[in-house]
């Protein structure tokens, strides 16, 4: 299950970067800022110093008779690696890691508010989110969805949107609930309790509204699971039917009797019943999906 839930509207490449770097996102939340690009590491400076010294030697040689003819060529040959070291910065593993951290930090700042960490949630909210994620995984990974028996296109859009909306609401609820409890910690005057009571009820009713969303997802997933069971059973029956003639030949050759033949012919009836069960399950799943669609805006 994902520990970082990203708004489906975030570009896919940015979303992958955020999902894969929970540790750096946590550090960013705590105020961490990566260092900017630095100078090349020591080995490159040493190489540059060696090249510079060699160039100076070439200049000295150029002062002699032989040096006047070979000096310019030597200078050109030695200037090439010096320019490479000076202007082309070869990345070291440490440099690549630092660049990666800067990139993650930049995306974290850019998309702040469009991702939720599991660490943002209190315990009850985490349990709710995990339930929602399991329901989403049940639907999205099912064969009936992958084979297009469900509305796979709408699922691909609706399910991530549902997961994100649930995570967003739970993060907001967790943060407000934590501040609410902190404010009311210790002794409180009766006037404070009178003001806090309806606010506490508002928090509880908001949580119940999110629970209702999660339960709707779970009902949909349960219908899809039933359709999945019927689909798998139908596939197995189809494979057995494809080999039915082999069984019939074996029964006839061994003289197993008419009772065995009757059992084999019932495969066709079983397959028909599974077809009907699959159609009913898919129909029920479509009906359950309707409860996940956003309704008309309230006036």
Image (tube, helix red, strand yellow):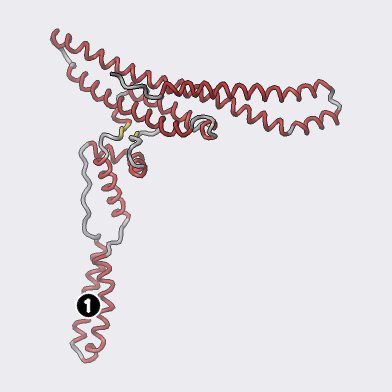
Residue 77, quarter of picture: bottom left
Instruction: Answer left or right for 17 relative to 249.
Output: left
**What is the tally of numbered marks visible in this picture?**
1
Q: Residue at x 52, y 35 (%)?
A: 146
Q: Furthest-bottom residue in view?
A: 65
Residue 50 vs 43, above or below: the answer is below
Q: Where the C terminus falls, by quadrant?
A: top left
Q: Quadrant of residue 193?
A: top left
From the viewer's side, name the closer residue of 44 and 96: 96
The quadrant the N terminus occupies is: top left
**Residue 181 pos. (x, y %):** 22, 18
Q: Quickly name the residue at label 1.
A: 55
Q: Position of residue 53 (x, y in %)?
A: 21, 75
Left or right position of 266 against 81: right
User: Helix, strand, or loop for circle 1?
Assistant: helix
Position in image of residue 142 (x %, y %): 52, 31
Q: Nearer the viewer, residue 19 or 113?
A: 113
Q: In percent of the image, x 76 and y 22: which residue is there?
A: 263
Disc 1 residue crowd, few under 14, some 14–19, many 20+, Cα 10 Å: many
Q: Is residue 152 above or below residue 177?
A: below
């Amino acid at each position: 299950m994902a520990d970082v839930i990203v708004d489906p509207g975030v570009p896919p490449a940015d979303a992958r970067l955020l999902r894969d770097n929970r540790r750096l996102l946590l550090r960013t939340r705590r105020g961490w800022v990566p260092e900017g690009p630095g100078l090349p590491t020591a080995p490159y400076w040493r190489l540059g110093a060696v090249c510079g010294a060699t160039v100076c030697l070439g200049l000295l040689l150029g002062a002699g008779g032989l040096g006047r003819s070979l000096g310019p060529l030597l200078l050109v040959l030695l200037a090439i690696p010096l320019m490479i070291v000076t202007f082309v910065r070869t990345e070291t593993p440490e440099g690549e890691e630092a660049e990666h951290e800067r990139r993650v930090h930049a995306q974290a700042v850019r998309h702040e508010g469009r991702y939720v960490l599991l660490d943002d949630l209190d315990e009850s909210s985490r349990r709710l989110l995990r339930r929602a994620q399991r329901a989403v995984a049940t639907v999205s990974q099912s064969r009936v969805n992958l084979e297009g028996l469900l509305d796979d296109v709408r699922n691909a859009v609706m399910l991530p949107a549902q997961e994100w909306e649930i995570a967003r609401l739970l993060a907001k609820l967790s943060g407000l609930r934590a501040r609410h409890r902190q404010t009311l910690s210790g002794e409180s005057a009766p006037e404070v309790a009178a003001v806090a009571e309806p606010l506490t009820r508002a928090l509880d009713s908001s949580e119940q509204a999110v629970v209702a969303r999660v339960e709707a997802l779970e009902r949909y997933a349960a219908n899809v699971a039933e359709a999945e069971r019927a689909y798998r059973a139908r596939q197995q029956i189809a494979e057995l039917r494809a080999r039915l003639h082999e069984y019939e030949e074996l029964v006839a050759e061994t003289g197993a009797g008419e009772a065995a033949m009757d059992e084999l012919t019932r495969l066709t009836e079983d397959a028909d019943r599974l077809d009907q069960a699959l159609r009913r399950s898919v129909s029920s799943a479509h009906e359950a999906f309707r409860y996940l669609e956003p309704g008309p805006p309230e006036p």
